[in-house]
Image (spheres, rainbow, N blue to C red):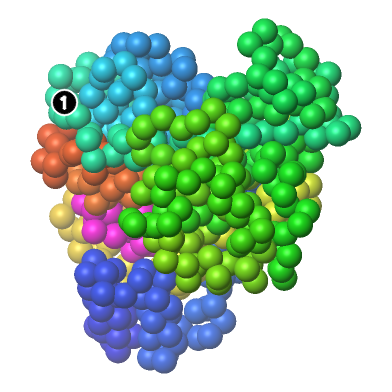
């Protein structure tokens, strides 16, 4: 070994230690690794910084923004609710409906976001139908990961694999190049989960249910403003636009409660709707120009102070002077220059009118006011805390536009009318320009850690190739697999990635093993594409432990899963996924047979 190889292996060893031990954040580790490669002379500055301008980094950032646009317009929430409604009442139907739908959602959005979105929906679904949440959450999480194999842009590992393949001079992957494999894997996953439902643990999930249910019940009052676009339109249209997280509890017209008005009755300017709404729906109500929160409409004009008005939430403290007093008696607008726009109570009845509600210890108040006045509220002993409101406004009126932008982006990339990075970058910009998502939220949607980690680990793969380390390791592996069939070697690459991804991210695993796969393929005189693709598939579709994928970590607590649950259920599935992946990759790129008995 020469010095560059020794230096690279030492840097690689230190990077692996930091990635696995998590003593530093993954993005910090990636940057330290990049600097070490430059300082030791393994790479020059241009090579080290090439990752930031790479296609994978650009596409990943753009996909985060596009996903944010779909979430901000309520599309992902609406799809999630549709999945819950279509799941019927049986466990079998719920799995059969949820898994393909979740996989399809994950093909163009981040799979962790899809898992997080579906988690409360399935938890509520299981509770309402007397099912065990643990029997539904694991199939859903596995489907989200399998869905990333449907398109090139759904997982960083495949973007990095494409980058590695193109650097060899071979044709790169198209956006749907891996779709045949992905379809086979999703179908396999659904059939496997339906056939082995008895393996799934049956636990209640008490740790997660109540929080997801109860935070959806904010009591508030909604005003149909003068000249509203909702005026003369039936209530059913408004309910459809606001989604299932909006529940009517009463209807006031001319100050009188009306029992004779229903979903088909027209709304009139000045009507007050008594509603219960989720945090996101509550933020959306105030964001709609045709609607307003009644308390803000009545008292908001007299609120003084500096800064843009905003929503915050405060908890009524034990022993607070507010306990037992109604919202009307407190006169918040005059005393604190803030308006009580909503109320959440853990348990117990709330008066029909928000102004008549008598406060209790632990009640959560949604307050509207100006930032300069919040310091006085935060210091008051009657409140336990004052924090930003958790709800995100849904721009539902722009949902068709967001879908059109997504469709145009995919078509432009798939037909190669535009290069994929440019197509997705334009899609992200279009989401912001058309106000499907505001620019501040767009920046928040980008997971900087993943972006920086990808930009930082790409030079690691370059260094592995440039120093000859990949060739050296490939030669050693070649001695082991000498005489083996291409199918067996593809299985070796999948298995190696499946094991390594349990301690590293899918991106880091692909960058480290991809160059070895390329060198091995070149030594065998075979195209590198199937070997690199199988490596990436092993990095994203291995279900051996709960730590292998971030989505599995999300369901660990709510489903009350144990470590051996994933091994018992995931090991057979991962074995079958490996066989299907290798077989399909051989058929697609090595002219192997599609059916076992074919010649």
Question: Is residue 84 left or right of 432 when viewed as pictured?
Answer: left
Whether residue 544 is in magenta: the answer is: no
446 or 247: nearer the viewer? 247
Q: Quadrant of residue 123?
A: top left
Q: Is residue 447 above or below residue 70?
A: below
Residue 460 position within the rendered picture, expressed as x and y whole percent measured from the top left: 40, 72
Assess whether residue 499 is covered by the magenta stretch. Answer: yes
Residue 191 at x, y = what percent? 30, 18
Residue drawn where x is 73% and y is 52% of the image: 300
Image: magenta residue range: 494-512
Residue on which disc 1 sits: 202
Chief secondary structure of the magenta span? helix
Q: Secondary structure at mark 1?
A: loop
Place of residue 437 in the rendered image (x, y in percent of width and height, measured from the top left): 68, 49
Q: Is residue 101 left or right of residue 335?
A: left
- Point 53% across, 65% down: residue: 377
> Position of 217 compared to 141: left or right?
right
Front-most of residues 67 and 559: 559
- Residue 69 visible from this viewpoint: yes
Residue 484 visible in the snapshot: no
**Is 6 situated above or below 540?**
below
């Amino acid at each position: 070994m020469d010095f560059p190889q020794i230096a690279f292996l030492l840097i690689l060893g230190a990077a692996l230690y930091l990635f696995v031990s998590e003593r530093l954040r993954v993005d910090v580790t990636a940057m330290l690794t990049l600097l070490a490669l430059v300082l030791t002379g393994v790479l020059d500055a241009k090579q080290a910084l090439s990752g930031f301008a790479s296609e994978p980094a650009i596409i990943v950032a753009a996909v985060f923004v596009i996903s944010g646009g779909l979430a901000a317009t309520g599309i992902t929430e609406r799809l999630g609710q549709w999945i819950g409604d279509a799941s019927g009442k049986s466990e079998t139907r719920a799995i059969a409906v949820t898994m393909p739908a979740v996989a399809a959602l994950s093909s163009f959005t981040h799979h962790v976001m899809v898992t997080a979105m579906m988690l409360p929906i399935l938890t509520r679904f299981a509770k309402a139908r007397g099912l065990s949440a643990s029997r539904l959450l694991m199939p859903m999480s596995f489907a989200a990961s399998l869905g990333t194999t449907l398109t090139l842009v759904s997982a960083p590992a495949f973007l990095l694999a494409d980058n590695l393949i193109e650097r060899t001079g071979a044709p790169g992957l198209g956006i749907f190049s891996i779709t045949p494999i992905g379809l086979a894997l999703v179908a396999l996953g659904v059939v496997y989960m339906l056939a082995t439902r008895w393996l799934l643990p049956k636990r209640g999930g008490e740790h997660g249910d109540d929080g997801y249910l109860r935070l959806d019940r904010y009591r508030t009052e909604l005003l149909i403003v003068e000249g509203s676009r909702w005026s003369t339109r039936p209530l059913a249209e408004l309910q459809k636009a606001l989604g299932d997280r909006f529940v009517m509890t009463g209807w006031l017209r001319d100050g009188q409660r009306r029992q004779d008005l229903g979903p088909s009755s027209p709304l009139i300017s000045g009507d007050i709707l008594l509603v219960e709404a989720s945090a996101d729906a509550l933020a959306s109500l105030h964001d709609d120009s045709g609607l307003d929160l009644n308390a803000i409409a009545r008292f908001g004009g007299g609120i003084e102070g500096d800064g843009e008005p905003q929503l915050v939430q405060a908890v009524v403290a034990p022993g607070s002077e507010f306990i037992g007093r109604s919202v009307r008696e407190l006169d918040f607008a005059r005393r604190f220059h803030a308006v009580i726009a909503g109320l959440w109570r853990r348990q117990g009845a709330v008066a029909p009118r928000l102004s008549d509600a008598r406060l209790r210890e632990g009640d959560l108040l949604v307050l509207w006011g100006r930032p300069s006045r919040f310091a006085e509220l935060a210091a008051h002993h009657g409140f336990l805390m004052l924090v930003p409101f958790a709800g995100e406004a849904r721009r539902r009126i722009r949902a068709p536009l967001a879908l059109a932008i997504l469709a145009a982006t995919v078509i432009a990339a798939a037909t190669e009318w535009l290069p994929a990075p440019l197509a997705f970058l334009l899609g992200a910009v279009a989401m912001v320009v058309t106000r499907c998502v505001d620019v501040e939220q767009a920046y928040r949607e980008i997971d900087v850690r993943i972006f920086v980690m990808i930009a930082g680990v790409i030079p690691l793969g370059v260094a592995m190739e440039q120093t000859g380390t990949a060739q050296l390791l490939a030669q050693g592996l070649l001695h082991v697999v000498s005489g083996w069939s291409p199918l067996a070697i593809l299985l070796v690459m999948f298995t190696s990635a499946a094991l390594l991804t349990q301690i590293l991210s899918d991106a880091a695993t692909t960058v480290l093993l991809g160059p070895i796969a390329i060198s091995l393929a070149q030594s065998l005189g075979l195209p590198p594409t199937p070997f690199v693709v199988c490596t990436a598939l092993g990095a994203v579709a291995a279900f051996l432990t709960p730590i292998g994928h971030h989505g599995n970590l999300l369901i660990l607590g709510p489903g009350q899963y144990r470590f051996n649950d994933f091994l018992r259920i995931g090991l057979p599935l991962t074995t079958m996924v490996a066989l299907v992946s290798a077989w399909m990759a051989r058929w697609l790129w090595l002219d192997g047979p599609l059916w076992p008995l074919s010649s």
